[in-house]
Amino acid sequence: MIFRAAVEHAKKHPGLIPQFFFICLGMGGAFVYLIRLARGPHVTWDKSSNPEPWNKLDPTYQYKFVAITTDYKNLKKEGPEF
């Protein structure tokens, strides 16, 4: 129903088509980014099977989206293994 009204408005006012496109593109990008964050190694959905998943990460695992100054290949593990 809302989609049909948007299509009718776009037919009457063709200048709204780019606006609808970029709004949908932004909403889709935000949804994909939220899914990416929810599937990260630091998120626990099931505490019974793996209560602390961040302890099982390799010290060379790059979990940041952008790491400009950190060289993960030469990083040494700095703590005891639990």
Image: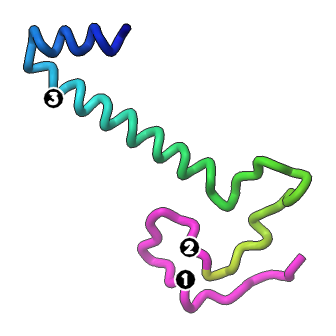
* Quadrant of residue 73 within the rendered picture: bottom right
Q: Is residue 76 above or below residue 17?
A: below
Which x, y percent locates residue 48? Answer: 91, 52
Residue 33's mark?
none
Q: From the image, tell me which residue sits under label 2.
A: 62
Q: From the image, tell me which residue sits under label 1.
A: 72
Instruction: Identify the image quadrant of the N terminus.
Output: top left
Report the amino acid beneath label 1: Tyr
Q: Which residue is drawn at the image coordinates 19% and 9% (left, top)?
A: 8
Residue 18's mark?
3
Q: CA distance from mark 3 to mark 2?
A: 37 Å
Name the foreground residue: 32 vs 80. Answer: 32
Left or right, 5 with respect to 74, comes to left
Which x, y percent locates residue 81? Answer: 86, 81
Question: In the image, which is nearer the foreground, mark 3 or mark 1?
Answer: 3
Secondary structure mostly taken by the magenta-highlighted segment of the chain: loop
**SS type, badge 1:** helix
Left or right, 54 with respect to 25, comes to right
Report the amino acid beneath label 3: Pro
